[in-house]
């Protein structure tokens, strides 16, 4: 794990001297400042933190962090981050990516890093559009959405990032609005604490090419009624008056009102983020009303590094070769059994 420190940093210690070049009003600023505030709470040395990005608006992130970082190539950030983490397990490695970068050209890298469960973190900026290249539809754009590359409406059904991630075996998945910095900061801290691959989807507004894409669920005047913020071990309850909740009805999630038809808070489902079986988590990520936010899944599992280390110890224990020279001078051929 990363080296812990006694020295206390502030967000200014993680702020670089580079001019931030995002559009005014973009939620990327919120994510950036949330990360800069979260890192001092993680207790890692600044030189032990690495940000890896691909291509897109979100991928400018490493320039704005006073840490190590790499601005890599389109869709390949998870692969490069995997190499960084495996080469130096003591680093805190973060992949900063967008919906196009991660799930279009980078789709294979995205699903396989989740499948392998390497101990790194991914923050997915989802604005349902290609922003950097000026407004083409992305893998998360809605059917009928008019963009620069679909002027009459998009005809391709979108990915749901959480559904794709859980299908690939993700052990940690969180979803959060892009306008709640305190919640983003806490979720980043929770992701850092998790041992394995963590994925956070941020529902992020693009003020230029897809303005208001999540306003129907993230605006302050509607979010309490349109979102259910999940917390492990607590009832699935929501609403401005905290009077609505979720129950299971014939294998489907159903919204009920406390006090109607004899429903009480004890009837509501209790969120279990740590359940191994992802069935309920899949139902939650697909839920359209209310939209599930918070940490939806957090299942502790063996990491790739732990599996590799265990296999290496086993092979070494059973091998007659104790050093490289033993292999080189063992004869003209050798057999792997």
Image: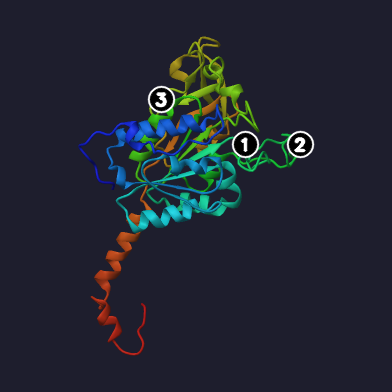
How far across and down, in percent of the image, does residue 263 sit? 50, 14
Q: Is residue 161 visible?
A: yes
Nearer to us in this view, 24 or 107: 24
What secondary structure is found at the residue carrying circle 1?
loop
Relative to 327, residue 246 above or below? above
Q: CA distance from mark 2 to mark 1?
A: 14 Å
Q: In the drawing, does residue 243 fall left or right of residue 304?
A: right
Q: Residue furthest right?
A: 152
Check if mark 3's residue and mark 1's residue have beta carbons within 8 Å.
no
Q: Residue at x 63, y 28 (%)?
A: 211
Q: Which one is earlier in the sequence, the residue at label 2 or at label 1?
A: 1
Q: CA distance from mark 3 to mark 1?
A: 23 Å
How far across and down, in percent of the image, does residue 86 sit? 36, 57
How far across and down, in percent of the image, does residue 230 sit? 45, 27
Q: Residue at x 48, y 31 (%)?
A: 29
* The C terminus sits in image quarter: bottom left
Q: Quadrant of residue 122?
A: top left
Q: Which residue is tagged 2?
A: 153
Q: Residue furthest left?
A: 6
Q: Residue at x 79, y 36 (%)?
A: 152
Q: Which one is earlier in the sequence, the residue at label 3 or at label 1?
A: 1
- Label 2: how many residues lie within 10 Å, few (<14), some (14-19) or many (20+)? some
| Disc assigned to residue 128 | 1
């Amino acid at each position: 794990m990363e080296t812990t420190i006694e020295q206390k940093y502030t967000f200014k210690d993680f702020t670089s001297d580079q001019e931030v070049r995002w559009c005014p009003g973009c939620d990327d600023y919120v994510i950036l400042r949330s990360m800069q505030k979260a890192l001092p709470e993680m207790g890692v040395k600044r030189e032990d933190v690495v940000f890896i990005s691909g291509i897109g608006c979100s991928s400018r992130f490493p320039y704005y962090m006073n840490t190590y970082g790499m601005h890599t190539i389109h869709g390949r950030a998870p692969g490069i981050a995997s190499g960084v983490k495996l080469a130096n397990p003591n680093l805190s490695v973060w992949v900063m990516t967008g919906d196009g970068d991660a799930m279009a050209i980078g789709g294979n890298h995205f699903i396989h890093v989740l499948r392998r469960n390497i101990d790194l973190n991914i923050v997915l900026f989802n604005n349902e559009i290609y922003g950097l290249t000026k407004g083409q539809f992305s893998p998360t754009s809605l059917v009928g959405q008019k963009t620069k590359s679909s002027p009459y409406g998009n005809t391709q059904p979108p990915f749901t990032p959480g559904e794709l991630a859980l299908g690939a075996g993700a052990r940690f998945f969180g979803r959060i609005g892009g306008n709640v910095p305190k919640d983003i900061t806490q979720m980043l801290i929770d992701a850092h604490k998790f041992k394995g691959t963590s994925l956070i989807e941020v529902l992020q507004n693009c003020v230029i090419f897809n303005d208001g894409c999540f306003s129907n669920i993230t605006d302050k005047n509607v979010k309490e009624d349109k979102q259910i913020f999940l917390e492990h071990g607590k009832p699935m309850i929501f609403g401005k008056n905290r009077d609505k909740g979720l129950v299971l009805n014939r294998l489907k999630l159903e919204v009920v009102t406390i006090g109607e038809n004899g429903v009480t808070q004890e009837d509501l489902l209790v969120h279990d983020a740590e359940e191994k079986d992802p069935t309920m988590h899949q139902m939650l990520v697909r839920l359209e009303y209310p939209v599930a936010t918070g940490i939806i899944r957090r299942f502790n599992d063996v990491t790739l590094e732990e599996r590799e280390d265990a296999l290496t110890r086993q092979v070494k224990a059973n091998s007659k070769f104790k050093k490289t020279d033993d292999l080189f001078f063992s004869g003209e051929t050798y057999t792997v059994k």
